Amino acid sequence: MKNFCKVFLLLNLVLPLYSCGEGESFIQDIVYNVADEDVEVGVEFNNYFNLELESSIPILQYGTLNFIPAGRETGAIFSFSLNMNILNDKDILSLKKTRVLPNGSPMTNYVESDLLWLYLKNQKNVHPSFYLGTDVDDFYIGAAVQFVFIDEQFPEQLTITQRFRDSKGRLVGAMTIFGPRLYNNGSVRDYGGIFFVTNATDLKKFVEQDKAEIRSHGVSSAEIIVKKNGEDYTISDNELRELIKKLNKKIKEFNKSQKKTEDF
């Protein structure tokens, strides 16, 4: 990749997630690189979402979806890279278009057009997929990852979405944690997971706007939207606290299972 302009945005989001502590959120950092034909975007989680998962999943021959475990000074990182020549691939352009998550719930309305949905090769306990728009002048890119530990113990088709902005108030993306979709008998049809989406056209524009300026860090605002089956949903402080506690416990169990697998 060449002629990259790097922007490091320390997203100190101000969403209080109760059991996570006041003023904290799942995301603490986002890094993006934008060039003429290539885009790289990475999200760093805070220490309440530290998956011990290391993987690089090909997006055909056009890029990768990556997981990097937490380090001493960094949280776990979820990132993807993509070459824009993917839009010249007729097989890609013939994919199903959608604006729904893998659990059947609508995406955040940050996404304003239907996206191509590309299923990627499943990993053990992880089901990834990639989304991309077809308009280079309004180019959305995103990824969803379903985890087998977000199962029937979590609220069906619940979505908790956080939008994030840079210090200049510019919207740079959204992340959704989504619950599973169940069969009538209560068993899992589609596991829950995480979905991250951004607009590469906007990111490139922000890079160009900031070229001659000292880049500031921090966040001017943060938003959270909770829905269930696509409808606005009110969740109490206690419910949210218990949900976050349950998710944290599941992540720890997942990490232990990953370590046992590595030991063999």
Image (cartoon, rainbow, N blue to C red):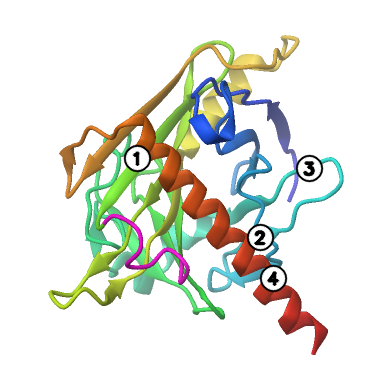
- Give yes or no for contact between labels 2 and 3 (Cβ–Cβ under 8 Å): no
User: In the rendered structure, which disc, 1 or 2, sits on the residue that comes first in sequence?
Assistant: 2
What kind of element bears circle 1?
helix
- Nearer to the camera, 166 or 104: 104
Circle 4 residue: 256
Circle 3 residue: 74
Circle 1 residue: 239
User: In the rendered structure, which disc, 3 or 4, sits on the residue that comes first in sequence?
Assistant: 3
What kind of element bears circle 2?
strand
Distance between the alpha carbons at the discs numbered 3 and 4: 20 Å
Residue at image position (29%, 55%) is: 155
Measuring from the top left, give residue 19's x and y in whole percent.
53, 35
Distance between the alpha carbons at the discs numbered 2 and 3: 13 Å
> In this view, which residue lies farthest toward the bottom?
264
The circle drawn on residue 67 is: 2
What kind of element bears circle 3?
loop
Q: Is residue 137 visible in the rendered structure shown here?
A: no
Examine the rendered structure and indicate whether residue 130 appears above or below residue 175. Answer: below
Tag 1: amino acid: Glu
Measuring from the top left, give residue 39's x and y in whole percent.
60, 46
User: In the rendered structure, which disc, 2 or 4, sits on the residue that comes first in sequence?
Assistant: 2
- Magenta span: 147-155
Q: Magenta stretch containing residue 242, yes or no?
A: no
Q: Nearer the viewer, mark 1 or mark 4?
A: 1
- Nearer to the camera, 249 or 158: 249
Q: Is residue 100 visible in the rendered structure shown here?
A: yes
Distance between the alpha carbons at the discs numbered 3 and 1: 29 Å
Mark 1 surroundings within 10 Å by alpha-carbon count, few (fewer than 14), some (14 through 19), many (20 or more):
few
